[in-house]
Amino acid sequence: MPQTQKLIQAIELQNKGDIDTATQLFREILAASPDNPHALYSLGLIELNAGHLDQALALCSHGVKANPQFVQLYYLQGAVWQAVGNQEEALRSYDGALAVDPNSQEVLLNSGALLRAMFRHKEALERFNRILAINPNHVGALGNCGIMLTEFKQSEPAIAMFEKLITIKP
């Protein structure tokens, strides 16, 4: 079976919940093509979800070195670092993703939430506002901005954010 077809099959199996068969296929793909970003990402995600953080991190680390333009690998690496408890490395990974795609709303949202957890509120608010510049109706960014503006004692803009959020998602 050609590698592309095997990859599609593996991803379909992963999405259907047949993790064992998908894992086997991803490993076969990586045996033939060790730098395949899709297989590295998918197998890394499987390892993260299984709690195998060392394996997930190894796959992501190899993946970002071999495929420095593949945003999803940086994003997954950030999630793994967060699961390990290393917020600084997680943020570095998210920043790597943003260097490749500065408009990735998913990365901006998660890195903003991480910055907020790290008490780096101004930087977090900047990331949420970047999302809103791209998508003014982004529910997660509106909610986070509203909360942060409340914490900054900026009631009027916070109320405006929450009102907009309610109209979008009642």
Image (cartoon, helix red, strand yellow):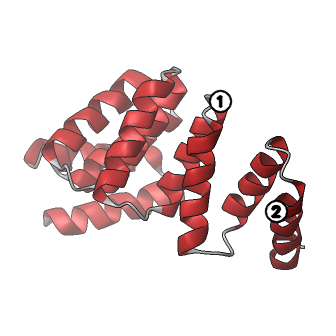
Q: Closest to the observer: 125 or 77?
A: 125
Camera sees residue 88:
yes
Q: Residue at x 13, y 42 (%)?
A: 31
Q: Secondary structure at mark 2?
A: helix
For the residues labelled 1 and 2, the Cα–Cα distance comes to: 21 Å
Residue nearest the observer in this picture, 15 or 101? 101
Q: Is residue 168 above or below residue 112?
A: below
Q: Is residue 66 left or right of residue 49?
A: left
Q: Identify the secondary structure beneath mark 1.
A: loop
Q: Quadrant of the C terminus?
A: bottom right
User: Amino acid type of disc 1?
Assistant: Phe
In front here: 80 or 103? 103
Q: Which residue is mark 2?
A: 157
Q: Looking at the image, which residue sits at the far bottom? A: 167
Q: Looking at the picture, how far across and down is residue 10, in whole percent? A: 34, 58
Give the quadrant of the N terminus: bottom left
Residue density around tag 1, few if under 14, some if 14–19, many if 20 or more, within 10 Å: few
Q: Quadrant of residue 12?
A: bottom left
**Whole-percent x, y for residue 163 in the image:** 89, 71
- Which residue position is annotated with label 1? 119
In primary-sequence order, the first of circles 1 and 2 is 1
Residue name at image x 43 percent, y 59 percent:
13
- Can residue 47 be seen from the camera position used here? no
Q: Amino acid at mark 2?
A: Pro
Q: Report the residue at 78% width, 51% height from top.
A: 149
Is the Cβ of the residue at disc 1 closer than 8 Å to that at disc 2? no
In this rendering, would 87 be left or right of 28? right
Please tell me which residue is depicted at 72% across the width and 66% down the height of the picture: 139
The answer to whether 136 is drawn above or below residue 30 in the figure is below
Residue 51 at what x, y percent from top left? 51, 27
